[in-house]
Image (tube, coloured by chain):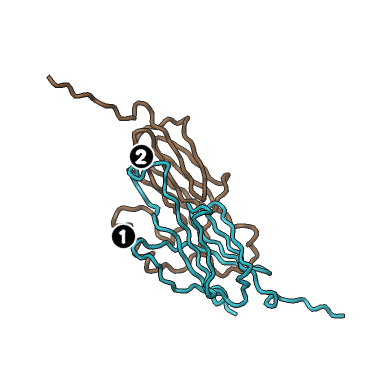
């Protein structure tokens, strides 16, 4: 599976990373995870489920507006992008702690098999985006009977 | 008074260390009447939330429901973590813990911590 990512630098500030973050980062790298350092901006977590019927991609995107999420599929690569904006309500408020990352994000993931592009569905519930991609007939597994002579 | 003293994080040990907890990212703001705390708890619904104030310590717990729509055996690649969210904050006395309010919207938990009346700035009119 190929994972690519691209991100604009963003202006959000984040406190110095904790030891736990550092360890997560270290082990994440060791096990081939591609999430960037906490210092490089917002990189939402992606999960990929796959079975005979469909592929499901889930992304943790807390605090977005539906219209600020973009999903596209090109050459078997699903891309989720968007922007999380600061809430106007607190723009002028005194800020005591600012750990949430704001700004643009983009994540791409290569799908394991071809999907029916016109039957893709996406839902956004409790800050989690779920994209359901039904497989094409050709991509579904076939049972091959064994003949015994 | 320094900002962090108002709503200070307190080192409270997780009660179920075998599973572990995720510390949600928070923003804390101060408006004229309230302190407002926003925590990121993606995947948590209203039923999974547990907010308690005990001995001036505010504890937020967010439990994520089991995924029923697609079996976990179909998981091919994972970056999210399964653990529940938990974080505690020590509340300053200037917060009226009896009037704390909370709302949950698309994975963002917003907790409103009202200031007690006397700690609000007061305008004194000259007669």
* Image hue for chain A: brown
Against B43, residue A119 (above or below) is: above
> Residue B85: x percent and y percent?
45, 60
Please give the label number shown on residue A50.
2
> Residue A80: x percent and y percent?
47, 44
> Residue A101: x percent and y percent?
50, 59
Q: Which quadrant would residue B5 be assigned to in this image? A: bottom right
Against B121, residue A132 (above or below) is: above
Residue at the outermost left position: A149
Image quarter of the C terminus of chain B: bottom right
* Chain containing mark 1: A
Label 2 residue SS: strand
Is residue B3 rendered to the left or right of residue A119?
Answer: right
Residue at the image point whose x is 50% and y is 67% from the top: B59
Instruction: Count neighbours of disc 1 (C-alpha within 10 A) and say few if under 14, some if 14 to 19, many if 20 or more.
Output: few
Is residue B25 rendered to the left or right of residue A26?
Answer: right
* Image hue for chain B: cyan
Q: Which quadrant would residue A79 be assigned to in this image? A: top left
């Amino acid at each position: 599976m190929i994972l690519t990512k691209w991100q604009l630098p963003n202006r959000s500030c984040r406190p110095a990373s904790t030891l736990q973050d550092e360890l997560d980062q270290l082990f994440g790298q060791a096990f081939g995870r591609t999430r960037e350092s906490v210092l490089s901006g917002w990189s939402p977590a992606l999960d990929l489920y796959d079975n005979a019927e469909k592929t499901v991609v889930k992304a943790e995107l807390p605090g977005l507006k539906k219209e600020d999420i973009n999903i596209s599929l090109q050459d078997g690569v699903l891309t989720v992008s968007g922007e999380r904006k600061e809430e106007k309500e607190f723009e002028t408020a005194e800020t005591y702690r600012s750990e949430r990352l704001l700004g643009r994000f983009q994540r791409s993931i290569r799908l394991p098999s071809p999907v029916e592009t016109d039957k893709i569905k996406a839902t956004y519930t409790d800050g989690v985006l779920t994209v359901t991609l039904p497989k094409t007939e050709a991509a579904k597994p076939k049972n091959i009977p064994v003949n015994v002579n | 008074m320094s900002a962090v003293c108002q709503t200070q994080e307190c080192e409270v040990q997780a009660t179920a260390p075998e599973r572990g907890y995720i510390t949600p990212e928070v923003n804390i703001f101060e408006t004229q009447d309230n302190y407002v705390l926003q925590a990121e708890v993606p995947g948590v619904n209203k039923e999974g939330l547990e907010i308690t104030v005990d001995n001036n310590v505010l504890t937020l717990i967010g439990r994520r429901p089991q995924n029923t729509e697609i079996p976990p055996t179909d998981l091919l690649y994972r970056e999210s973590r399964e653990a529940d969210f938990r974080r505690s904050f020590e509340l300053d006395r200037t917060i009226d813990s009896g009037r704390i309010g909370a709302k949950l919207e698309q994975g963002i938990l917003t907790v409103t911590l009202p200031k007690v009346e006397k700690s609000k700035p007061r305008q004194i009119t000259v007669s």
